[in-house]
Image (spheres, rainbow, N blue to C red):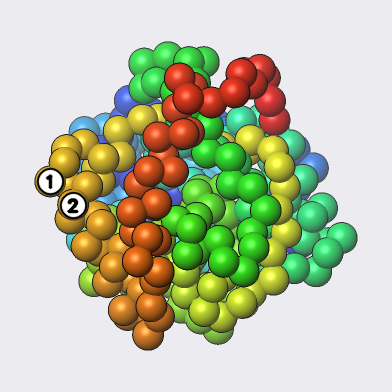
Amino acid sequence: MRVSVITAVFSNKAFVTDAIESVLTQKNVDIEYIIVDGGSKDGTVEIVKSYGSRIHKFISEPDEGVYFALNKGIEMATGDIIALLHSDDFYAHPFVLSQVVEAFEKTNCDAVYSNLYYVKSNNINKIIRLWDSGDYKENSFFEGWMPPHPAFFAKRSVYQNFGSFNTTLKSAADYELMLRLIFKNKISLQYLPKFFVKMRTGGASNRSLLNRIKANMEDRKAWQINGLQPKWYTLVLKPLIKLFQYRFFSYFRPDSIH
């Protein structure tokens, strides 16, 4: 099975190399690598171009944000499986994608998901949060659950059948996508209890109380768009769950977990 990896980037010359290298050093897997740039002028484009034909598809043009860019990449993809990796993120080790493919081949599922580390921007060996997804159950979304989309790998046919990111949403497009694919349309899942992705801290929705309130309103809209009704406690639990991902609250885990 071929994996189409899509990286959306805009003016991120400081970190994009880490993302690219983590994809190009994946072993025992057939990869189509697609990079969608939003019209960077800071040297990002030159960095991407320096990899030549190792980047299979590359476009650089103004867009309206990361979800627009990811949708472009999904439309361009030809692989059996689609992986989404932001330019701030990188794979934890060289066998991530081969393990993902193995899980698809063994189970014939629609999507595979795993776990994610949040790390400090200036010290990628310093783990701040552990997004331990856990097994999906029928009521998981009611309890504030969702998997991290950089650690979510779906067959291209899933996007063809059920659509990609809803760009009317700013901060909750990934949540709405998971809700639509997993809860509403009940795609089949396989959970791999491994930490496959490292993400640098700094998500926009968590930078201030106002942003968190706006994000919560968008989370509610994600349910409404799909004709679904959350429980009264669902959108309270969703941000609270994040508190228990921080190392201060977590049980001790070795930093070498994969």
Q: Residue at x 40, y 69 (%)?
A: 231
| Relative image position of residue 55 (x, y in whole percent) | 52, 47
Q: Which quadrant does the C terminus fall into?
A: top right
Q: Which residue is mark 1?
A: 210
| Relative image position of residue 239 (x, y in whole percent) | 35, 47
Q: Are marks 1 and 2 in contact (CB under 8 Å)?
A: yes
Image quadrant assignment for residue 47: top left
Image quadrant assignment for residue 156: bottom right
Q: Which quadrant does the N terminus fall into?
A: bottom right
Q: Residue at x 39, y 61 (%)?
A: 234
Q: Residue at x 21, y 36 (%)?
A: 207
Which amino acid, by three-letter code, is at mark 2? Answer: Ile
Is 133 located above or below residue 19 in the figure? below
Work out whether residue 150 or residue 21 is closer to the camera in this orientation and state it.
150
Q: Residue at x 57, y 66 (%)?
A: 139
Q: Which residue is mark 2?
A: 213
For this view, does 72 lie left or right of residue 153? Answer: left
> Badge 1, how many Cα within 10 Å: few under 14, some, many 20+?
few
For this view, does 106 lie left or right of residue 164? Answer: right
Is 239 located above or below residue 122 in the figure? below
**Considering the numbered disc 2 on the image, is that residue within a helix, a strand or a loop?**
helix
Work out whether residue 216 or residue 111 is closer to the camera in this orientation and state it.
216
Work out whether residue 75 or residue 151 is closer to the camera in this orientation and state it.
151
Which amino acid, by three-letter code, is at mark 1? Answer: Leu
| Relative image position of residue 183 (x, y in whole percent) | 54, 73
Is 181 located above or below residue 117 in the figure? below
Image quadrant assignment for residue 61: bottom left
**Considering the numbered disc 1 on the image, is that residue within a helix, a strand or a loop?**
helix
